[in-house]
Image (tube, rainbow, N blue to C red):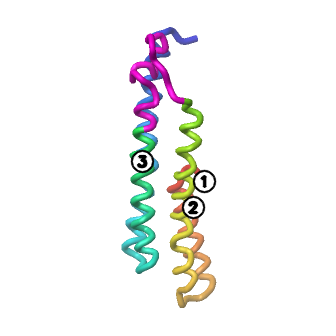
Amino acid sequence: MINLEEGIMLAKLFKAEEMVYLASVMFPKLAVLSLYIRLFVNPVRRLSYFAGAFVIATFFAGTLSFAFACRPFAFNWNKTIPGGYCINTNISYTYFSIPNLVSDAAIILLPMWPLWKLNVPKSTKIGLLATFVLGGVYVSPTL
């Protein structure tokens, strides 16, 4: 059993963890997309820029959504504040996961066509495709 002070500290830590999670999802995705920009030519390069902008926009939308989920901000951990309210965070988490899944799928699918068109033996193509798919799955924690 935890006391009131420990409960408040846990609620504050959970709020901080939400913000750290958003960054921990964004930066690995941007790293992979920057690799794609260096490795591939158009249209993959152009689509990688678009996907990067989408990932950054998702980060900012999630940050704003999580930061302003409760008014006043202290209502996140102190539900006794008169007039305080929060949005439905479960719905917020669900709607944040949709663009996150879309960007995960884009990161995995972007290099597939150019890799398949390479003039190398089929076993090499399969190895390259597996490497990129496994790298995309590792970077994309939601898949």
Q: CA distance from mark 2 to mark 1?
A: 8 Å
Image coordinates of residue 65 in percent, x first then y, are 45, 37
Measuring 41% from the left and 80% from the top, which residue is drawn there?
41
Mark 2 or mark 1, earlier in chain: 2
Out of 79 and 124, give the one closest to the viewer. Answer: 79
Image quarter where the N terminus lies is top right
Magenta range is 65-87
Measuring 44% from the left and 19% from the top, which residue is drawn there?
75
Out of 50 and 44, give the one closest to the viewer. Answer: 50
Badge 1 density bin: few <14, some 14–19, many ≥20, Cα 10 Å: few
Disc number placed over residue 105 in the picture, else none:
2
Disc number placed over residue 143 in the picture, else none:
1
Image coordinates of residue 93 in percent, x first then y, are 55, 39
Q: Amino acid at mark 3?
A: Phe
Q: What residue did someone put label 3 on?
A: 59
Badge 2 density bin: few <14, some 14–19, many ≥20, Cα 10 Å: some
Q: CA distance from mark 1 to mark 3?
A: 17 Å
SS under mark 1: loop
Disc number placed over residue 47 in the picture, else none:
none
Whether the residues at callouts 2 and 1 have beta carbons within 8 Å, the answer is yes
